[in-house]
Image (cartoon, grey):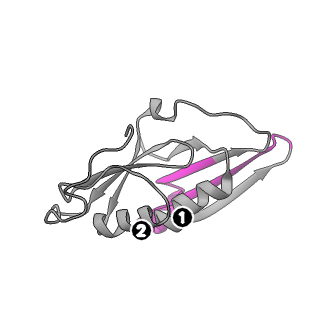
Amino acid sequence: MQYLHTMVRVGDLDAALHFYCDLLGLKEVRRKENEKGRFTLVFLAAPEDEARSAELQAPELELTWNWDPEAYTGGRNFGHLAYRVDDIYALCEKLQAGGVTINRPPRDGHMAFVRSPDGISVELLQKGDALPPQEPWVSMDNTGTW
């Protein structure tokens, strides 16, 4: 068995790409548009997974954007996406500066949770050992659900 991808439906493709690529740091690796089905698929890979994505088309995140508007609710019901990151504090700072709420701050220097524009829960895990606790994260409370 081989993990291929996780698919999430998005209501606003531009907002989703801004979150996943510009803020979170994923890379768009391919895109498929289906006029008959009226949808676009955008496949993303973490920077350290780009080579495997090119070779195996895995592991990836598939964003599915249906051209006809739909309301998506309950994004948390599938769980969450998880990414290992080089510097959890720097990424959380970048996300926060980009308008993203840090739902579970990285108080322990190891783990944080944020949500995509479509309500998908994203877990961030520090690569290697946890970073030493630092402000403002240590004093931040959880916000909303994560």
Lower sequence index among marks 2 and 1: 1
- In terms of secondary structure, where does tag 1 sit? helix
Residue under the image location 41 percent in, 35 percent down: 79
Q: Nearer the viewer, residue 51 or 120?
A: 120
Pinpoint residue 108: horizontal percent, then vertical percent: 17, 55
Depicted 104 relative to depicted 85: above or below: above
Quadrant that contains the N terminus: top left
Inspect the image, locate mark 2, and give the three-letter code of the amino acid beneath it. Answer: Lys
* Callout in the foreground (2, 1): 2
Say whether residue 39 is magenta: yes
CA gap between label 2 and label 1 equals: 12 Å
Estimate how packed mark 2 is, as few (under 14), some (14 to 19) or many (20 or more) residues with alpha carbons within 10 Å: some
Give above or below for 5 relative to 126. Answer: above
Q: Residue at point 57% right, 44% down?
A: 118
Quadrant that contains the C terminus: top left
Q: Position of residue 94 (x, y in %)?
A: 42, 68
Which residue type does callout 1 highlight?
Answer: Cys
Q: Which residue is mark 2?
A: 94
The residue tagged with tag 2: helix, strand or loop?
helix
Q: Is residue 87 left or right of residue 107?
A: right
Q: Alpha-carbon neighbours of circle 1 within 10 Å: few (<14), some, or many (≥20)?
A: some
Instruction: Look at the image and give the residue range highlighted in magenta.
Output: 36-63
Residue at screen point 65% across, 45% down: 64
Which disc is residue 53 wearing? none
Q: Which residue is mark 1?
A: 21
Q: Is residue 42 magenta?
A: yes
Q: Position of residue 49 (x, y in %)?
A: 43, 64
Is 81 displayed left or right of 7 in the figure? Answer: left
Tell me whether circle 2 and circle 1 mark residues in contact (CB < 8 Å): no
Q: Is residue 4 above or below residue 19?
A: above
Coordinates of residue 58 in the picture (x, y in percent): 49, 54
